[in-house]
Each structure stands twice: as structure tokens, then as C-alpha cells.
């Protein structure tokens, strides 16, 4: 074999195992492997976990907080969101492909060092910035490919109807290599028509949908039912992701709970970004069986001055905000930055099973819950069977 990891715990397993890797794949998992390998690592009762997945980020805007007069403030409400969008408009007019590429690579490295092997980023596509951000992130994706996979969502941050020319730019972005089509219905006066255009583009290019939906602390901002209707009508199920759905948290149970049940039956993925405005009904979504995952969202930009690209930080914050602290709840939070996120991002083969890609991360913690609580950096990262980072002594 190429590599054997010995004496490590897998998430949810009570006894240590050995993991054998060959040709970039996991080929055998057993209590004790008698085989030998070119390289062996004694994990010393640490955690062998699937590589982390950050399902929602904005690489094109990342690391621009210092360009905001007065500094970025973070999003505590809808007015803060409006101010951040306005500040972002001024900043992105000056973007260059090189500027975007370099910042994206920096954040991708931060994420990879935290154990992330896959991330999805939304990239603004609109008449203000054109395709500059997209081209910069496309270059970053190519440069980072040996150690992290980057998926790109073409994102109409300024709306579609209110920004003439955006629909054509989205089409060009998909032709250039964007992996998914995004949306933000609240930015248009006719949210339903916005959703219709997004679904039409998804059908035209056979791409998944990943939209910012109901990113508000007001009950009247509730486009989710229409997105559900469209998803069910088109039979798209797991091909649709909705991010934020914050307004669900302020709706009464008689509206929110049937909507959550419908989300579960539809197969729509839900991205919970715990940093902004109001966290949605995380506990209820998990209890209903919705595929929930977490994202970093904004990294040191006009929307949020903090952020470090570490999925475990997102998991911990989500647990703190929703008082999820049992071992089982923490394990589910770990799923939200690993298996659940990989599923939402279209990875059919992922995880810790024979035949899965050897994209792994090793922690000194012995359980997924401990990894979230301890917040220690990984001691080793394996990408496509290759040891790309190792601090194990």
C-alpha cells in the first residue's frame, strides 16, 4: 500500500482501526492490517475523519474588510446587510482578476490548513463587476487544485431584474465553468420571477441551484414556499440548496414546522451560516431529517470582519447559538461540515469506506465531538491519498 494509518478512531466508532490507502483510495479498513506501506502513521488513538467541507463562502469578496470606510461591522440585522451590500458595491468596482485570484488563494490555503478538502464559493456576477470576480476565482481554483477542490456558484448579488444584463452574464459565467447557479430573490421586486429565471438557467445548463433565501429577521420575507413549489414541480430534489432561511426562525410554529417537513420530503439541502442576522431553526431542521450543512459565508469582508475558513469554528458557533451540546448533537454538527455538506455539493462517493477517495484529516481528539470542542488544528491532512500536511510527532 501507499499509506497506512494505524490506531485511529473513526467518527462514531468505539475501537481504533487501521486504514489502508492505495492509488488515492481507501482500500481496506480493519482492526489491524497485516500489510505494509511505503509510509505508515501511528495515529495514537486520534481521530481519522473524512476531509472537511465548507459549503458556502464568498472568496471574491474575502479579505476586503480593510477597504471599508470605518471598517466592517458584522450583520446583526437587515439594515446592516443593506449597508454591507452598499459597501461591497463600491469595493468590487475596483476588483481585478489578479486581486481576486490572490485573495482567493490565500483563503483557500487557510481553509485547507484547517482540514478542508472541498469548498463552494459564491462569486458576484453583475454589471458592476462583470466577470472579473469569476475569472479570478477560476484562476485560483486551478492553482489550488492539488490540495483543495473549489466549486463556484454564479451569484447575482445585485438581483437579476433590477440589474439589466445580469441574466446574460450569469449565462456567460456558466459557460466559462461555474459549477452552479445562484440567486437572491429578495434583491428583486418580483422574487418569484427571480426564482423562475434561476430555475430556467439551471435547466438550460443542467447545473444545480444554490440560492440565498429569506436572509432576513422579518416574518414577511418568506420566499421559501415558492422555492419548494418550484423544486417539487421540476423534480429537482437534492439539486437545490437554500442558504440562510433566517426568517423561518421568526415565523410561528404552525407555519414553520409544516414548511420544515416539506423541506425534508423535497430533498432540498439547507446551508446554515451561523455568523449573520439570525440563525434559522437548526434543531427542528435536523430533527426532521433535512440535509443540513454549515458554511463560513463571509471572511473578513464588508459583511463580516471575522472568519478564519475553519469549518469546525462554524460548527462550534452553530452549537453555541442553538444550545446543542450533547455528544450526539456535536456529532451531528460534525456531519454538517463533512458528510452532509459533501452530499449537498454532489459528492456521491465520500467518507470513510473502502473505495472512497482518500481525502482525510487527522485530529488529536478521539471523537468528532472533541474535535469541535477542542478546536485544535489537524495534525495531518491527506488529499487524494497524498500527505499534503503533517505535524504529527
Image: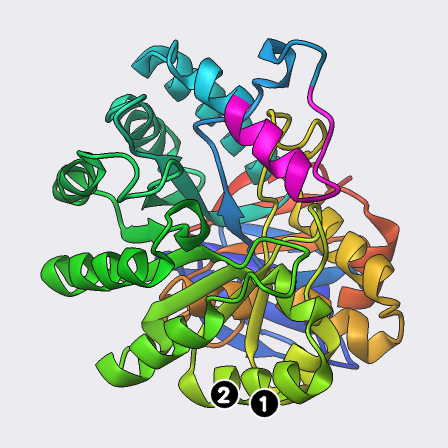
The tag on residue 275 is: none
* Residue 193 seen: yes
The label number, if any, that marks residue 258 in the structure image: 1
Characterize the local packing of mark 2: few (<14), some (14-19) or many (20 or more) Cα atoms within 10 angstroms. some
In this rendering, the answer to whether 14 lies above or below 144 is below
Q: Residue at x 27, y 59 (%)?
A: 193
Residue 241 position (above or below residue 123): below
Towards the viewer: 42 or 10: 10
Q: CA distance from mark 2 to mark 1?
A: 6 Å
Question: Which SS class for mark 1?
Answer: helix
* Main SS class of the magenta portion in the image: helix
Specify whether 216 is left or right of 327.
left
- The picture quadrant where one finds residue 302 is top right
Q: Which residues are magenta?
A: 72-86
On whether residue 82 falls in the magenta region, the answer is: yes
Q: Position of residue 163 (x, y in %)?
A: 27, 34
Which quadrant would residue 258 be assigned to in this image? bottom right
The residue where tag 2 is placed is 262
Residue 228 or 251: which is nearer the viewer? 251
Amino acid at each position: 500500500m501507499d499509506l497506512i494509518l494505524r490506531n485511529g478512531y473513526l467518527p462514531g466508532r468505539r475501537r481504533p482501526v487501521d486504514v489502508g490507502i492505495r492509488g488515492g483510495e481507501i482500500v481496506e479498513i480493519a482492526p489491524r492490517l497485516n500489510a505494509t506501506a511505503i509510509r505508515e502513521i501511528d495515529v495514537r488513538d486520534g481521530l481519522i475523519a473524512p476531509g472537511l467541507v465548507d459549503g458556502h463562502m464568498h472568496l471574491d469578496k474575502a479579505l476586503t474588510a480593510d477597504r471599508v470606510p470605518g471598517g466592517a461591522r458584522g450583520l446583526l440585522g437587515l439594515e446592516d446587510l443593506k449597508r454591507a451590500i452598499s459597501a461591497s458595491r463600491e469595493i468590487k468596482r475596483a476588483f481585478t482578476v489578479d486581486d481576486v485570484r490572490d485573495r482567493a488563494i490565500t483563503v483557500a490555503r487557510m481553509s485547507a490548513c484547517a482540514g478542508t478538502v472541498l469548498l463552494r464559493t459564491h462569486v458576484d456576477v453583475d454589471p458592476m463587476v462583470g466577470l472579473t470576480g469569476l475569472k479570478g476565482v477560476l484562476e485560483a481554483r486551478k492553482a489550488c487544485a492539488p490540495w483543495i477542490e473549489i466549486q463556484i456558484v454564479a451569484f447575482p448579488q445585485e438581483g437579476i431584474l433590477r440589474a439589466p444584463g445580469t441574466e446574460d452574464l450569469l449565462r456567460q459565467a456558466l459557460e466559462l465553468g461555474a459549477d452552479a447557479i445562484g440567486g437572491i430573490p429578495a434583491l428583486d421586486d418580483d422574487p418569484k420571477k427571480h426564482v423562475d429565471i434561476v430555475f430556467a438557467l439551471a435547466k438550460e445548463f443542467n447545473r444545480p441551484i444554490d440560492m440565498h433565501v429569506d436572509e432576513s429577521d422579518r416574518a414577511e420575507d418568506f420566499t421559501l414556499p415558492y422555492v419548494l413549489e418550484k423544486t417539487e414541480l421540476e423534480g429537482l430534489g437534492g439539486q437545490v440548496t437554500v442558504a440562510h432561511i433566517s426568517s423561518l426562525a421568526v415565523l410561528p410554529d404552525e407555519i414553520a414546522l409544516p414548511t420544515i417537513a416539506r423541506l425534508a420530503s423535497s430533498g432540498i439541502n439547507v446551508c446554515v451560516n451561523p455568523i449573520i442576522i439570525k440563525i434559522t431553526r437548526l434543531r427542528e431542521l435536523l430533527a426532521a431529517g433535512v440535509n443540513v450543512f454549515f458554511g463560513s459565508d463571509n471572511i473578513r469582508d464588508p459583511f463580516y470582519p471575522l472568519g478564519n475558513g475553519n469549518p469546525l469554528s462554524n460548527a462550534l458557533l452553530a452549537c453555541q447559538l442553538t444550545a446543542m451540546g450533547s455528544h450526539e448533537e456535536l456529532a451531528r454538527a460534525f456531519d454538517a461540515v463533512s458528510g452532509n455538506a459533501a452530499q449537498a455539493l454532489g459528492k456521491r462517493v465520500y467518507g470513510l469506506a473502502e473505495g472512497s477517495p482518500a481525502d482525510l484529516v487527522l485530529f488529536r481528539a478521539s471523537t468528532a465531538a472533541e474535535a469541535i470542542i477542542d478546536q485544535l488544528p489537524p495534525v495531518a491532512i491527506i488529499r487524494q491519498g497524498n500527505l499534503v500536511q503533517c505535524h504529527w510527532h
